[in-house]
Image (cartoon, coloured by chain):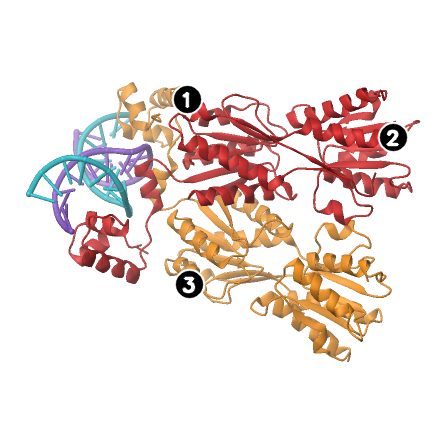
Chain colours: A red, B orange, C purple, D cyan
Amino acid sequence: MHQPTIIDIARQLGISKSTVSRALTAHPNVNEKTRQRVLELAEKLDYQRNQLAISLLTNQTRTIGIMVPEFISFFFPKVIIGAQEELAKAGYNVVICHSNESYEIEVTNARSLFASRVDGLIVSHTKETRNFDHFRTFTRKSIPVVFFNRVWESDEVSKVVVDDYTGAYQAVEHLVQTGRRRIAHLSGPDSLPNSRSRQNGYLDALRHYEVPVDPSLIISYDLTLEKANIYVNHLLSLPEPPDALFTINDPTAIEAIQVIKARGLRIPQDVAVVGFSDDPISALIEPGLTTVAQPVDEIGRQAAACLLAQLQATNPVAEVQTVVLPTRLIVRGSS
Amino acid sequence: MHQPTIIDIARQLGISKSTVSRALTAHPNVNEKTRQRVLELAEKLDYQRNQLAISLLTNQTRTIGIMVPEFISFFFPKVIIGAQEELAKAGYNVVICHSNESYEIEVTNARSLFASRVDGLIVSHTKETRNFDHFRTFTRKSIPVVFFNRVWESDEVSKVVVDDYTGAYQAVEHLVQTGRRRIAHLSGPDSLPNSRSRQNGYLDALRHYEVPVDPSLIISYDLTLEKANIYVNHLLSLPEPPDALFTINDPTAIEAIQVIKARGLRIPQDVAVVGFSDDPISALIEPGLTTVAQPVDEIGRQAAACLLAQLQATNPVAEVQTVVLPTRLIVRGSS
DNA sequence: CTGTTAGCGCCTTCAT
DNA sequence: ATGAAGGCGCTAACAG
């Protein structure tokens, strides 16, 4: 079915489409009566402007793409909501893509967002991503890109991260100060900067307190719950099992708690557990999970702010910046 | 910065833009050598086709809008992922909007999706939505709309729902059969069809087993956790408090469990609790939450299938359909 | 205040 | 196999 255009309105009113366009866009130079007639007919015809045509003409869509690896856990949805709020205030729409942790899908999504000419990008990449050429496509064209959480370490893009190092340091410090000596660490892939930072925080805390570092207690894994299960079981089967477990994130910690319970061990008496992120589930399970909280919606808001700064700047490259947000240790029953 | 277009390629190669277009779109009538030259230059220039221009021309964006009231809980993200998988297979992109349970934002989102000319819509509306004119804008133009979970009861749109009535009936039947006589029901707003269906299932189960219906045990509320907390406390303070609680969803049930525990009551001995949806948290808390499971990603897949059927039909209106998916009671420690 | 003209980037007849 | 021309819906000069 044919959708009404400004030409339809113009014809029916016997005026030119320019006048219709002006009336519709609140342009000052239009006779008030003419405007009224246009508005009425537009209403009657259920006219809706075609954003496609406008975008093609103005070369901006006022749409921002947000790319995340998943959005089942609370983290990414919260970040997205924070970003969206900020972006909406500035009159930007948001389209959300998730790659399901697949590098290929991420590349496809990036192409698709580029093809639909988003004005900017907010990204947390997959754990598989090693090559960032699909983001260079944007930066080369001066389309601003902001990374958060999992960031591309390039000076072409802005970044919003939390102080992973200090968060991890404080978590491990807490475990040492409550008497733990064999603290295991379930870490993520080394390719993820935040994984490396958390591991460094873990190591430095141990060294500072002169707790021996045992490499067999440090396991980098692929962040799937299946592997988490296997490695926690492995650690607990060691001749000298750990008396504490610091995990890269809360889902891993929660999985660990299930495993520890299933083996009949007590938390925290036999094994203490500390996670990272303060997933809402952490407060609901028993025992409550000690964890490092991140200011999640603030991450989204800051990412949006970075992007808007670049969007409004005459020279977007000059506005590239890195924001580091603080973390906060929340002690619950698991430690 | 100027982005390369087919005209740039054409000029540099000394051929016409028509030929470039054909080479790029795998049109049969192009000399193989010409195609190679075009493809090479396109690669070198980092040419990316402008989807905006194509959409304007072809009058289809191959993009589907998905509108949900929120996506913090696991339910909507899972549905979206299911839908997205199915849609991607058919070559459609997805843009996601969430209204944060605000009717106004929902209307704005609908306008924006219409303006950007999505080819179809998958929707679960806000709990405030009474007026559906913003969806009529689509149906009037023969743009297919599929509702799920919270559905517009109109024959202009397809619907995917679960058998809420039977799910609720079985939940209450289970409570009766385990000896409960004063079963309270925390219900949602009457404006939501699924809320009404679940309430009817609750009522019919009680009647069938000749358990007296006590109106003071049935509370419709606004689905916020704050109110859930208040009403659960209210119920437990009754002279004759309930010995079981059936809630409209899992977050409510989980909140109820916290309240019950805080009052020093035992679950399920003093009060049994049954939720709805099988949120992953249900299996993690203690005691495990008995709940009515829904085939969540299947809802998304079916919604996508309905939409694709209408998209591919010559007469989209003829393809309007309603899909009802089964539920399954999962008994855990809370009952 | 209003009309005319041009063009955003692309695909598609219709010629050649 | 290729080129020329037209048009998708709209806004923005430029005239009047």
Secondary structure, mark 1, is helix
Say whether mark 3 and mark 1 are on the same chain. yes
Q: Is C15 placed left or right of B317 in the picture?
A: left
Residue B43 marker: 1
Asked whether residue B3 is in view, the answer is: yes
Please state which of the two labelled residues, at mark 2 or mark 3, is closer to the viewer. Answer: 2
Q: Residue at x 59, y 61 (%)?
A: B161
Chain ID for label 2? Answer: A
Q: Residue at x 33, y 31 (%)?
A: B22
Q: Is A323 placed left or right of B33 in the picture?
A: right
> Mark 2 belongs to which amino acid?
Arg
Which residue is denoted by mark 3 in the rendering? B133
- Residue A307: give x, y in percent of width and height: 47, 33
Please state which of the two labelled residues, at mark 2 or mark 1, is closer to the viewer. Answer: 2
Q: To which quarter of the image does residue A37 belong?
A: bottom left
Asked whether residue A189 is in view, the answer is: no
- Residue B5: give x, y in percent of width and height: 33, 28
Tell me if mark 1 has few (under 14), some (14-19) or many (20+) residues whose alpha carbon lies within 10 angstroms of its own. few
Say whether mark 3 and mark 2 are on the same chain. no
Residue A180 marker: 2
Q: Residue at x 64, y 64 (%)?
A: B163
